[in-house]
Amino acid sequence: MNNDLSRTRLLLGDDATERLCATRVIVFGVGGVGSWCVEALVRSGVRHITIVDPDRVCPSNINRQLMATTSTVGKPKVEVLRDRLLDISPEAEVDARFMAFSADTAAEFNLNDYDYVVDAIDSIPDKMLLIRTACLSKATLLSSMGAARKLDPSRIKVTEFWKVEGCPLARKLRQEFKRQGDKPARKFRCVYSDELLPNQGTSDEPRANGSMVHITGVFGFTLASQIIKDVFKEAEGEGRE
């Protein structure tokens, strides 16, 4: 029995913990939201995880992204995060893919290989493609809506995509799905917040928005919690939400 999961077993029980260890998850985007989601999953027992991101750590990531420190600036995010995850759980299988999910690369991913797909992508075209692709797969999709320009973590919620209110990103996605006449094949859960504050400062980065770790972290932990709760319910004989 793994001692590192003793507190997990104490809360969830042996069956749910073993199920969690066997769950296969792929996370697209390991920035301010995705990095915390991945950390929570591996610390909770997930032992089969794929992380996908095309970016390198930059100084502006340090205020909110798990792997971002002064010593990791310039390094691929997935490689830094992979090393951290293996330090936490040496027996874990961590597949780090230093690439984007896009129309050019989508064929390289078989989402049917996973139990869960976590979408923490920023790019709207790539996000839409991932949502459509995941909804055609056997995997359960969980998606993060916009986490920028927010300060109140108590306003972070989970609901079905078409029921999200007060989130400009969700509204934009829905408009584009309708305009293109190609809506996702099934419903899926989202993490979102209906809070939206104006930026108070300025940035050299075009279209950059302010964001804080206590928000992006809660977004990521909430995504992870949905998987953990699903697995626990299944172990107790209940279905997924």
Image (tube, grey):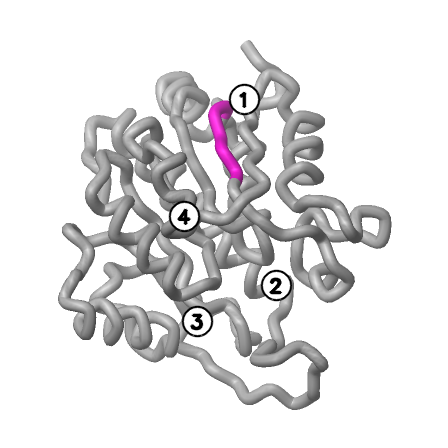
Q: CA distance from mark 2 to mark 4?
A: 34 Å
Q: Residues within 10 Å of mark 3 (few under 14, many from 20)?
A: few
Q: CA distance from mark 4 to mark 1?
A: 26 Å
Q: Which residue is mark 3?
A: 155
Q: Nearer the viewer, mark 4 or mark 1?
A: 4
Task: Say which element carries label 3.
Answer: helix
Which badge, 3 or 1, comes first in the chain's sequence? Answer: 1
Residue 98 as seen in the image, left or right of residue 114? right
In the image, what residue occupies the spot 28% across and 41% down? 140
Which badge, 3 or 4, comes first in the chain's sequence? Answer: 4
Q: Which residue is mark 4?
A: 104
Q: Is residue 39 visible?
A: no
Q: CA distance from mark 3 to mark 1?
A: 34 Å
Task: Say which element carries label 4.
Answer: loop
Q: Amino acid at mark 1?
A: Glu
Q: How far from the left and from the top, in percent, is residue 31? A: 59, 54
Which badge, 3 or 2, comes first in the chain's sequence? Answer: 3
Figure check: 107 above or below 63? above
Which badge, 2 or 4, comes first in the chain's sequence? Answer: 4
In the image, what residue occupies the spot 85% across and 48% down? 71
Q: Which residue is mark 2?
A: 214
Callout 2–callout 4 Cβ contact below 8 Å: no
**Residue bounds of the magenta highlight:** 47-51
Task: Say which element carries label 2.
Answer: helix
Q: Nearer the viewer, residue 147 or 43?
A: 147
Q: CA distance from mark 3 to mark 2?
A: 12 Å
Which badge, 4 or 1, comes first in the chain's sequence? Answer: 1
Q: Amino acid at mark 4?
A: Asp
In the image, what residue occupies the spot 32% across and 35% down? 111
Callout 3–callout 2 Cβ contact below 8 Å: no
Q: CA distance from mark 3 to mark 4?
A: 36 Å
Q: Which residue is mark 1?
A: 93
